[in-house]
Image: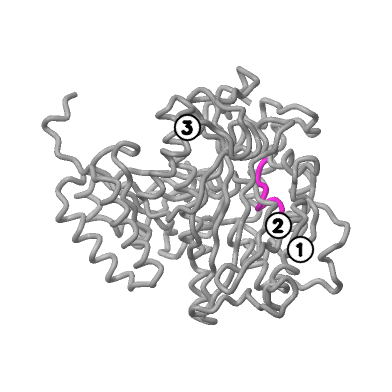
Amino acid sequence: MSNDLRNFLALSYDELEELNLHAKEQRKNRVSIDTIREERIKYLTDEKRIKAVTVMFSDLEGRLHMLDYDKKFLINSYDNLTFDGSSIRGFTAQRESDLRLGMDWSAFYWGPADIFGTGKVMVFGEVIDKDGSAYVGDIRGVLKTFSNKMFSEKGYTLNAANEIEGFLFKGEESERSYHETGKFEYVNTGGYYHSLPGDPLRTFIDTAAEVQRAMGFQNEKDHPEVAPSQFEINYGYGEVVAAADQIQLYKLICRQVARKMGLTASFLPKPVVGVNGNGMHTNVSISEGKKNLFWDPAGEEKISKMAWEFVDRILNHGNDICLALNASVNAYRRLDPHFEAPNQIKASAVDRGSMVRIPIGNEKSSRVEVRSVGPDANPYMVLYSVFKTGLDGHLPTDNIRQAERYLPDNVYTAIENFNAAAWTTDLFGAEVKGRYVDLKQGSADRCARLLGTFVKAPEVQFHHEVYNQYLWNQF
């Protein structure tokens, strides 16, 4: 059909960046939600070229869901958007399926028309239960509530930035067809920092970075990673909920750019045995006003007593929360000590095999880095687990920073640890914890118990980010 009769929104990348940075600044400054809502609704009403609003939310496992609402309908009905929660894995039972979507008007994004299509804007939604309360299975809402509580009660701003690695493979459906092909094909074999201008990997990285920049990510650096066809595109720090939203957008952008190139961006932790896997190193700090509470120039490794206690609590609960940070069967292939794997439950400034690393920092950048996180984990669950544990978890009775302890090397042990831990019940509540364990157990039971030395088709076929209903129903 010809586009001649259409007049849908399609902005330049510079215009997009300006709009997204303005929205980001409002969010950072905690502008009143009433003010932002009024501004957004006026914008949607006045901007005739917008046809639809894409509302995004994540399920319990972190899978991103998107619904397009006609703009005029949404303006009139944004406070009563219902959907069938029983169709979402890990959400309500069929007998109590009605849920609502509220708008987080501060989490509003303009996307490039050549990547996401013309005439649309994007906003993150908040899942609301039948009684009007926040839905317990919406971990984004749980994280946001915790973050707001820390700010209102203690003046803390929780900050995070994630270094998310991925692979670029040949073919648009390389993950979903893995059970047929049994292999992934690289587009580049150059390795760390090495790719030629114009080759598929470099073109992909450049394009994805341009989209991120336009969407207000405030990029820092990008490069091919150690393994063949591997990439990493880094961007700046943000408040914790915005940081988790950006993880979801980062993966969405990468997948969309790759698909337009006839390729697949994969965030499986270890899609190919024998080369480095994908991590999602999670850098975190806490500030009060403009003061970085993790910085102490006189402290051990120049971080504060508060920061070390934060680290100690995470190490103490390392095995308890491992399943939240490493959410798939495939994730436990990555926790392999031969490939810089962070499988040791200790903290170090230099040893990259440690679960927690203390990077070199200054008054502005001082932070701790949780390295034992897979990029396929629910980002809201990851950041909630890290911050809630670091602030409210139990301190160990002895010095465990250099103890000889290790994270599980298989999902079954991780499930057992998570299920047995009283701390994970404190984190998520018994009901949500039980649902999550059931989902992880279901994935594990469809796969070989022993990982072995090559990737089995079921660990890809039944992976929570890869699965489709047809394949799961073939089991």
Q: Residues within 10 Å of mark 2 (few under 14, many from 20)?
A: many
Residue 29 drawn at (x, y percent): 38, 72
Q: CA distance from mark 3 to mark 2?
A: 41 Å
Residue sitting at x 46%, y 60%: 242
Which residue is more in the foreground, 127 or 311?
Answer: 311
Asked if the residue under mark 1 is in contact with the one under mark 2, i.e. CB atoms within 8 Å, the reply is no
Q: Residues within 10 Å of mark 3 (few under 14, many from 20)?
A: few
- Quarter of the image containing the C terminus? top right
Which residue type carries mark 2? Ile
Q: Where is 151 relative to 140, above or below?
A: below
Which residue type carries mark 3? Pro
Which residue is more in the foreground, 154 or 291?
Answer: 291
Residue sitting at x 71%, y 27%: 456
**Nearer the viewer's eye, disc 2 or disc 1?**
1
Asked if the residue under mark 2 is in contact with the one under mark 3, i.e. CB atoms within 8 Å, the reply is no
Q: Which residue is mark 2?
A: 321
Q: Which residue is mark 1?
A: 315
Which residue is more in the foreground, 237 or 63?
Answer: 237
Q: Which residue is mark 3?
A: 197
Residue 78 drawn at (x, y percent): 28, 56
Residue 122 drawn at (x, y percent): 33, 49
Which residue type carries mark 1? Leu
Determine if residue 359 is in view. yes
Q: Where is 266 relative to 430, above or below?
A: above
Residue sitting at x 61%, y 35%: 463
Asked if residue 96 lies left or right of residue 446, the reply is: left
Magenta stretch in the rendered image: 321-328
State yes or no: residue 302 in magenta.
no
